[in-house]
Amino acid sequence: MNRRRLITAATAVALGLPSAARAAPNAELWPRWQAHDPAGRRTVDHSAWAGFLSRRRRSGPDGVARVAYASVIRDERDALKRYLDALSRVPVSELARPEQFAFWVNLYNALTVDVVLDHWPVASIRDIDISPGLFANGPWGAELTSVEGTALSLDDVEHRILRPIWREPRIHYAVNCAAVGCPDLAAEPYDAATTERLLSEGARRYVADPRGVAFEGDRLVVSSIYRWFDEDFGTGWPEGVLAHLETWAPPETARRLSTRDRIDGDRYDWSINAAEPPGG
């Protein structure tokens, strides 16, 4: 279990804070995953993930991307399992960095959908309480797969590989934690050629959405992602976060952000990002 997750969870309990207020893990590099081949030409086949997304990812009336978990049939479940098994056998250390980035993002997102399906129906991914540790909740600390013979959790992929290696704040728009408050699950897999476009599209879409940035009268309320991971956004909270938001915001929102020197609040909706009610 990540030490910071344990400490902050214990502190939150002691203070009576809601679990959503608990801080996220630091970006702590796992050196084992630094290996790559700058001249590598190997690619990874993500067509199975593309097929799943085309069938089961849906945009709701509010524009939020959701997954039709309840409609997934056995053949689709089996195909998703085979895709994840294929990813576990990829010699990722032999890939070039752009191909690695796409590999890790797709692995994270497909694993998240898979673990939700394994425990469906659930009202929130935090109800999938399989992580080790007294104060842990959700599936993020559980070892769900292996790559190159090394067991991995979702926390490992996000906080020990993606964030510390790439140091790219838009990673937070790429990985999806199956919550309504999260940036949307992309409609297509990441690959080396599409990564920059998908990262930018994800940033613009989320910052333009009230889940990311909302003005409520004179108050500025943002997604809790920006507080939990403020270290990833330049100089942090609030200056670095404000600068990041202004960069990706639509013109009128950017204008209003440019006059701000504070953020008045943050929030996050942990409801499952399901196209149907969990019991439906």
Image: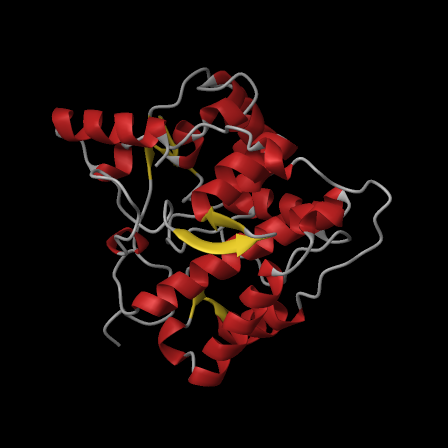
Q: Looking at the rendering, in which quadrant would you find the N terminus? A: top left
Expressed as whole percent of the image width and height from the top left, the position of residue 230 reads 46, 25
Residue 248 in view: no
User: In the image, 197: left or right of 154?
Assistant: right
Expressed as whole percent of the image width and height from the top left, the position of residue 138 reads 30, 49
Residue closer to the observer: 8 or 230 = 8
Q: Looking at the rendering, in which quadrant would you find the C terminus? A: bottom left
User: In the image, 276: left or right of 59?
Assistant: left
**Which residue appears at 25% of the width and 52% of the height?**
129
User: In the image, 156: left or right of 11?
Assistant: right
Expressed as whole percent of the image width and height from the top left, the position of residue 52 reads 55, 73
Placement of 185 over or under 163, stated as above or below: below
Placement of 21 over or under 78, stated as above or below: above
**Which residue appears at 77% of the width and 58% of the height?**
43
Expressed as whole percent of the image width and height from the top left, the position of residue 179 reads 37, 53
Residue closer to the observer: 87 or 262 = 87
Residue closer to the observer: 149 or 177 = 149
Query: Residue 169 sits in which quadrant?
Result: top right
Furthest residue toward front:
149
Residue 20 in view: yes
**Which residue appears at 14% of the width and 24% of the height?**
15
Placement of 188 over or under 161, stated as above or below: below
**Which residue appears at 27% of the width and 69% of the height?**
121
